[in-house]
Amino acid sequence: MPELPEIWNLAQQMNETLSNKTIAIVDVRQEKCLNLPLDLFQQGLENRTLGTTTAKGKWVFTKISPDQNLLLNLGMGGLVLYLDPEQAKKPPRYRLKFVFSDRSALAIDFSWFGYVHLVGSLAEHAMKASLGPSPLEEDFTWDRFRQILAGRKGILKSVLLDQHAISGIGNVYVQDILFRARLHPLRKIPSLDEGEQRRLYQAIRQELQNAVDLGGLIYERDLFNHPGRFQQFQVGYHEGKPCPVCGSIIVKIRTSSTSSYICPTCQT
Ligand SMILES: [Zn+2]
């Protein structure tokens, strides 16, 4: 499942590649991923020009001139591919495809189910409006992070995965974020002192930025169908192997509805 680094990279690539392209044809094979009836969705997009694309959490946002926004969420996973005019003649499997006036195309496929929504202002989109800040955005400051933690009583890992608190972290990257911060996933938020909170803040930013720099996970694909280069977890998915810092054996534990991989010595 793509998390913030993959979505962040995808949005950047879409911004560089698709800005100023005009949509000629909207071809939808999975109507239930839309928020509008098909004819209204098509009317709203055909002959419109794409503006800038950005990411927040697991959502990709593209401005559609003059006053609309296209929102994309890959759900459990999927593939968003740019096709040059030659590739667009024989597109891969897709649920939704935009063909542009220059005959290039964008093909979107979901491994299970995703969303492609067209809205006016972003504020009217309930899912977007309720998202917490994304750790790679400028407004994810140390003060903001402290405020997010201040009102919470739950366990650490649940808060990190709560998209209303912080958007974009999932069960993959959270493993090494917690290891980097030397914190146990079951710690209660009020028990974290300021030093621990600072370590956690730094770990979130560093871990996600590192993954962005590597183009995301090796088993996810970008806009040009290239795999990411991030594959070296510290403790994530390394059950039974030695901790790279202290040599203790990494264990897999149950944390509410998810699994966690931890070094029982380093993470307290
Ligand atoms: Zn260790």
Image: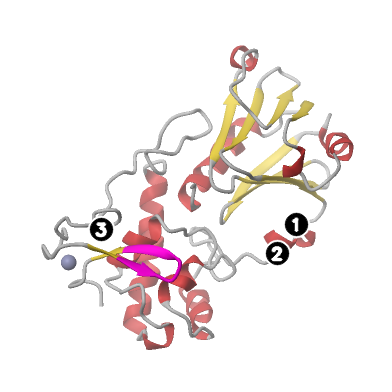
**Residue visible at 77% across and 38% down in the picture:** 31
Which quadrant of the view contains residue 173?
bottom left
- Is mark 2 in CB contact (under 8 Å) with mark 1? yes
- The image's mark for residue 101 is none
Q: Which residues are magenta?
A: 253-260
The amino acid sitting under disc 1 is Leu
Would you place residue 268 above or below residue 245 in this image? below
Q: Secondary structure at mark 3?
A: loop
Total number of numbered discs in the rendering = 3
| Label 2 Cα crowd, 10 Å radius (few <14 / some 14-19 / many 20+) | few
Distance in Å between CA atoms under marks 1 and 3: 38 Å
Q: Which residue is mark 3?
A: 235
- Is mark 3 in CB contact (under 8 Å) with mark 2? no
Q: Which residue is mark 2?
A: 129
Q: Is 70 displayed left or right of 196 in the figure? A: right
Q: Secondary structure at mark 2?
A: helix
- Label 3 lies in ligand 1 vicinity (Cβ under 8 Å): yes
Q: Nearer the viewer, residue 249 or 209?
A: 249
**Residue visible at 46% across and 69% down in the picture:** 160
Q: Main secondary structure of the magenta part?
A: strand
Q: How is the image coloured?
A: secondary structure
Depth check, mark 1 against mark 3: the one in front is 3
- The image's mark for residue 122 is 1
Sequence-first disc among 2 and 1: 1
Which quadrant of the view contains residue 235?
bottom left
| Label 1 Cα crowd, 10 Å radius (few <14 / some 14-19 / many 20+) | some
